[in-house]
Amino acid sequence: FRCGMVERLGFKSSHTGSFMSAVVSIAALLVGSGLLLLAGGLHGLLLPLAGLANGFSDASLGLLGTGWAVGYVSGCLAVPVIVKRVGHVRAFGALASLAGISVLLNLLFMDAAVWIVLRAITGFCFSGAAMIVESWLNERSTSETRGRIFGIYTMINLGATTAGQMLLTLGDPTGFFFFVLGSIIYSLSLLPTALSTAASPQPLTQARLDPKKLWRNSPIAVVAVFMVGISNGSFGTLGAVYGLRIGLDVPEIAIMMSLALLAGAVVQIPVGMLSDRLDRRLVLVGLAVTAMSFGSSLSFFGGTDPTLTVLLIAGFGGVVYSMYPVIVAHASDHAKPGDFLRISGGLLLIFGAGTMLGPLLASGLMTFTYPGALFQVTAAAHLSMMLFALWRMRQRASLPQEDKSDFVMAVSTAQITTPETVSLDPRTEVDETGGEI
């Protein structure tokens, strides 16, 4: 198990000094990123809880997730052009400010249609702001420090998102307090970049979608990442709605969603070990079967006992949030030198398309049936991925062990991954130098 943190990315003592200097130089950027994800975690869980309290339908809440995904993907495509025209600092200030304003507008206009539009605006701003911070981190990283900086950045964002969700255990989400707090945190994320004396980095990485190239490289990666987008988008948007519908209180829901995210990071350790030693498609099949098992249990038995439900959700999150990095690793196994960045960026856009569709499907089914139908949608996505993976295993032989790329941890939520995250990925350094992927 390499996980992007051994050998070429390694912890050699000769690099300790340079690594610590690099961390000190990017500390302000890491703080800014952490604040951005703290606000994003709080805002993302607050809206469905407050929406339900104000009588929003499940369909409207599902459209919040779709709106976010539309805005997020649009930001990944358009913000690089904006930054090229006005610069990194000005663009970041405008995007973070607009994200903070949108939170306050949620409070002023308690209307589902307005919230959907505001959620799309927030997704656009959030993805652009995250990309700008990541571009600075990428500029400051070297071949010796890239892997560890990427790891620290990933863990800070994971911890910040979790902390944002857990803030909701401290009070009532139906009042004004958490809306104002979210806006304040978005505004605080402005300070590190606004006060930085560092020169602006190179232009942002712009994701491009080439379906034919992606399909030729790895059909299973294309299908699987779309299905995982459907599953993770549905669960990330409507998991809190499911919790409320089955009788959980707000602190239990915050703990439930946070444990799912944390479990996704922890489970990647054994999953990474397996995928580096076995056919990654076989690992995906195993993850899909496990996810369907957890989902079936939640669909039929969720709500019978709060503790059991929270534990089942943690297990479900551990499995579904560990699928995305396996898919990216499988795609990079088959990529040609120089193609990793383009292929990973394209897969990110397909993942975003899945997150647009998933909440729509799940919210519609939950409206006309029962809350557990959420996991019927995720099970259908995982079943489709499993069947296609089994078929592809009959069409293409597994790669020899020595030709496989590194597995690198990544949390597969639309709130964390952007094209600049892909650019910061330690595998990109090998890719850009023409080395073997």
Image (tube, rainbow, N blue to C red):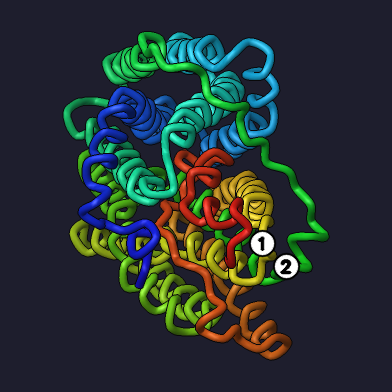
Nearest to the observer: residue 411 or residue 52: 411
The extreme right residue here reads: 212
Number of residues whose C-alpha sits closer than 10 Å to that of mark 1, classed few (under 14), some (14–19) or many (20 or more): some
Taking 41 as reference, is 435 left or right?
right
Instruction: Indicate whether 79 appears above or below 3.
Output: above
Quarter location, residue 155: top left
Quarter location, residue 185: top left
> The C terminus lies in which quarter of the figure?
bottom right
The amino acid at mark 1 is Pro
Residue ID at (27%, 15%): 177
Residue bearing the label numbered 1 = 337
Name the spot of residue 103 as percent of width and height, x first: 44, 17
Instruction: Indicate whether 191 appears above or below 150.
Output: above
Is residue 112 visible to the viewer in this orientation of the structure? Answer: no
Name the spot of residue 69 as percent of width and height, x first: 59, 38
The amino acid at mark 2 is Asn
Q: How many marks?
A: 2
Nearest to the observer: residue 114 or residue 215: 215
Number of residues whose C-alpha sits closer than 10 Å to that of mark 2, classed few (under 14), some (14–19) or many (20 or more): many
> The N terminus lies in which quarter of the figure?
bottom left
Name the spot of residue 397 as percent of width and height, x first: 66, 89
Circle 1: element type:
loop
Instruction: Indicate whether 302 appears above or below 284.
Output: above
Nearest to the observer: residue 134 or residue 372: 134
Residue ID at (47%, 39%): 415
Disc 2 to disc 1, how far (Cα)? 12 Å
Residue ID at (17%, 29%): 170
Residue ID at (74%, 60%): 214
Residue bearing the label numbered 2 = 217
Is residue 356 visible to the viewer in this orientation of the structure? Answer: yes
